[in-house]
Image: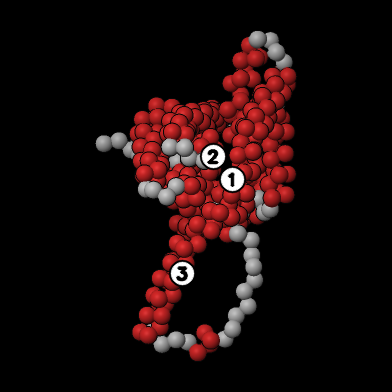
């Protein structure tokens, strides 16, 4: 019996509805299970970076489980050394925060006074609402900055639990990589397995190149910024230099994020404008070099995303997961683009997300 056009239209509508529902369910899971998803994404990123070391040890006839354990121990030792190196300086900086806040009070009071004057001038033009005079009760809430950083995790305790799970997940991912690889490919029909293998391999190489490349860029940037901060005798230069370099890696808003912490410390320390100008010029120049020279050299062309797609992804993932979303936005979007580039039906979307060529 031939299929009519109305039946085809109904089938297409039903298929579209199922896809919309599936996408809604997926985003619901990503939102409500954000702590689990963030932990998995971070573990996958770290495992993709450590995997070449594990494979090198396998060539030297070291069992994969032992090679995985060695790489995880090296990672934990490096993290411990970094925390040990900056702990005293970070603690001293936290103790100095009240002085920084005290210095910022005149600026914030000026901003509040300006905002109040603007509000008063608008009230003379726009009649005020009588209900606006009703007294309101204000509840003291957690700092909005801490809320932004911990969104998606929930609390400091949940964050610590998440950090504790990541080494275990990385170890199991590295140890069971061959089994996970084969099992993942078996999820696809036989005629699609080669395509699935290409997609998974492209994502793994992209993530590894992204993380390692940005790590190298961050180290080189910190190696340039930190001596300049030390020359101008900025307090906590060994902490502010790497922090400014790390924050400056954030696309587009990295300059503002990188300049802010050292400027706050300088505000507490200096009374002349020279150090402030030196800090601003240093961070801007290093950010320019990183974006135009270092990042193309070390990250390469695998993360080939245009400015619009990066901006939209940062807005979306930071809204969804806060600070963690801001950090993971680019690798997640680049992984999505890698899928689109290797699936024929999705290639137009991958081309839209890419920079293209003239």
Q: Which residue is mark 2?
A: 236
Residue at point 70%, 25% (across, down):
73
Cα gap from disc 2 to disc 3, whole angstroms: 30 Å
Q: Relative to residue 72, is residue 254 depicted above or below?
A: below
Which of marks 3 and 2 precedes in the sequence? Answer: 3
Per the rendering, the mark at residue 112 is 3
**Residue furthest bottom in the image:** 130
Please give left or right for residue 219 compared with residue 42 in the image.
Answer: left
Eye-nearest disc, 2 or 3: 2
Q: Which residue is mark 1?
A: 93
Residue at point 47%, 37% (across, down):
233
Residue at point 40%, 29% (across, down):
294
Label 3 Cα crowd, 10 Å radius (few <14 / some 14-19 / many 20+): few
Which of marks 1 and 3 precedes in the sequence? Answer: 1
Contact check, label 2 and label 1, Cβ < 8 Å: yes
Image quarter in which the C terminus is found: top left
Q: Position of residue 128 (x, y in %)?
A: 44, 86
Q: Position of residue 218 (x, y in %)?
A: 48, 33
Residue at point 45%, 62% (across, down):
107
Per the rendering, the mark at residue 269 is none
Cα gap from disc 2 to disc 1, whole angstroms: 8 Å
Residue 175: quadrant of the picture? top right
Does dot 1 land on a helix, a strand or a loop?
helix
Does dot 2 land on a helix, a strand or a loop?
loop
**Residue furthest front in the image:** 271
Toward the viewer: 261 or 67? 261
Q: Relative to residue 310, is residue 187 depicted above or below?
A: above
Q: Position of residue 173 (x, y in %)?
A: 68, 30
Q: Position of residue 136 (x, y in %)?
A: 60, 80
User: Is residue 318 something one can see in this rendering?
Assistant: yes
Q: Relative to residue 123, is residue 147 depicted above or below?
A: above
């Amino acid at each position: 019996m031939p299929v009519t056009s109305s039946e085809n239209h109904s089938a297409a509508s039903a298929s579209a509805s199922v896809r919309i529902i599936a996408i809604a369910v997926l985003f619901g899971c990503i939102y409500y299970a954000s702590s689990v998803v963030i932990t998995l994404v971070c573990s996958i990123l770290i495992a993709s970076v450590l995997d070449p070391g594990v494979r090198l040890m396998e060539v030297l006839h070291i069992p994969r489980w032992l090679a995985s354990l060695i790489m995880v121990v090296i990672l934990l030792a490096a993290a411990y050394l970094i925390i040990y190196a900056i702990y005293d300086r970070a603690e001293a900086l936290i103790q100095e925060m009240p002085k920084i806040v005290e210095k910022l009070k005149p600026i914030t009071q000026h901003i509040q006074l300006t905002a109040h004057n603007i509000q008063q001038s608008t009230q003379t033009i726009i009649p005020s609402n009588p209900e606006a005079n009703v007294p309101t009760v204000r509840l003291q809430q957690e700092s909005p900055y801490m809320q932004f950083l911990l969104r998606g995790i929930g609390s400091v305790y949940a964050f610590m639990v998440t950090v504790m799970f990541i080494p275990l997940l990385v170890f199991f991912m590295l140890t069971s990589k061959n089994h996970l690889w084969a099992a993942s490919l078996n999820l696809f029909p036989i005629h699609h397995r080669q395509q699935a293998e290409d997609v998974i391999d492209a994502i793994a190489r992209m993530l590894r190149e992204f993380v390692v490349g940005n790590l190298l860029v961050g180290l080189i940037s910190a190696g340039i910024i930190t001596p300049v901060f030390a020359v101008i005798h900025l307090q906590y230069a060994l902490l502010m230099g790497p922090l400014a370099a790390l924050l400056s890696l954030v696309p587009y808003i990295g300059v503002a994020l990188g300049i802010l912490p050292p400027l706050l410390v300088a505000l507490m320390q200096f009374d002349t404008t020279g150090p402030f100008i030196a800090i601003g010029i240093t961070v801007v120049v290093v950010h320019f070099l990183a974006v135009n020279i270092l990042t193309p050299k070390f990250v390469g062309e695998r993360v080939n995303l245009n400015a619009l797609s990066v901006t939209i992804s940062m807005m979306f993932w930071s809204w969804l997961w806060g600070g963690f979303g801001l950090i993971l936005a680019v690798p997640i979007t680049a992984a999505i683009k890698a899928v689109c580039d290797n699936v024929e039906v999705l290639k137009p979307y991958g081309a839209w997300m890419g920079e293209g060529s003239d």
